[in-house]
Image (spheres, grey):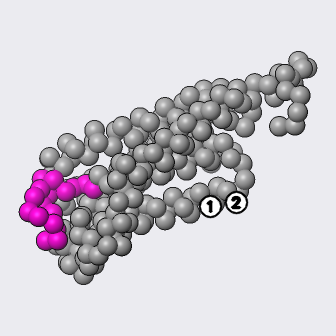
Amino acid sequence: MPAAAPLRSPSALLGLPLLLFALITWQVLADGPLVGADERLSRALVRPDRFSELLSDLGNVQVAVPVLAVALGYAAWHGRSRGADRWWLPPLAGALATALVPALVAPLKAWTDRPGTPAVPPAVGYYPSGHTATAVVAYGTATLLLFGVVRSPAVRRASAVLCALLVLGTSYGLVRRGYHWPLDVAASWCLGALLLAGVWWSVRRTPGAVSRSTRRSSSGTPSSRTGPS
């Protein structure tokens, strides 16, 4: 259907997060009115405690990346074993998106030079939030890769809900603990969405449900598989 064609390209998903990221970054650089509102919101939300610190740890590389590594390995194994065309593309896109997080966040931190909240020692380089971006890309990529290999609607819904809870939990913990301003976190949501668009495109370009053995059987050539799939 022609009306649905734009949704097949990641460019259809890039406009809003790119615009919001540019707006937030401009406000941080210019110390605009959004920054004042952001600081007032932070003062109302910051209540450092052990629970918020544990939630913020969900964005640690040591926590999020192993989860992603399992998803990358499973997606690669599943695609290769099913004989899917371009089975390597989604895992590669996921790994690349994750590698781009520090490559993009570090220069942005140096450029914006934003100070931290009063709850942390005096320092700069808090914008955007690297922990949030890591959580969005790692858990989001794992979920998208699972979508590429699992056909059960219930499993898909459960994985999407779990991903949202992990990202929101990380974000809440970072703001509540005072490790980041709310705008630092919101900007990383946008940045993560931009990186996930490429992963989503790669999953759509890799039909994991149809294997070479299935196609050979449908064309009249006997499949090497003897049992039910």
Residue with the most extreme top position: 221
Up/down of 77 relative to 65, above or below: above
Type of the residue with mark 2? Ala
| Residue range highlighted in magenta | 113-129
Question: Residue 92, percent across and down?
Answer: 49, 31
- Secondary structure type for disc 1: helix
Q: Is residue 12 visible?
A: no
Towards the viewer: 112 or 106? 106
Up/down of 119 relative to 97, above or below: below
Q: Residue at x 52, y 35 (%)?
A: 91
Seen in the image, is 216 located left or right of residue 122? Answer: right
Question: Residue 60, percent across and down?
Answer: 34, 53
Towards the viewer: 135 or 22? 135
Which numbered disc covers residue 158?
Answer: 1
Q: Residue at x 15, y 66 (%)?
A: 120
Question: Residue 164, percent across and down?
Answer: 49, 62
Q: Is residue 103 visible?
A: yes
Which numbered disc covers residue 154?
Answer: 2
Q: Main secondary structure of the magenta part?
A: loop
Question: Residue 82, percent across and down?
Answer: 72, 30
On the rendered image, what quadrant is the N terminus found in?
Answer: top right
Q: Are marks 2 and 1 in contact (CB under 8 Å)?
A: yes
The image quarter in which residue 49 lies: bottom left
Towards the viewer: 82 or 22? 82
- Secondary structure type for disc 2: helix
The image quarter in which residue 88 lies: top right
Q: Residues within 10 Å of mark 2 (few under 14, many from 20)?
A: few
Seen in the image, is 152 located left or right of residue 35? Answer: right
Up/down of 160 relative to 18, above or below: below
Towards the viewer: 112 or 14? 112
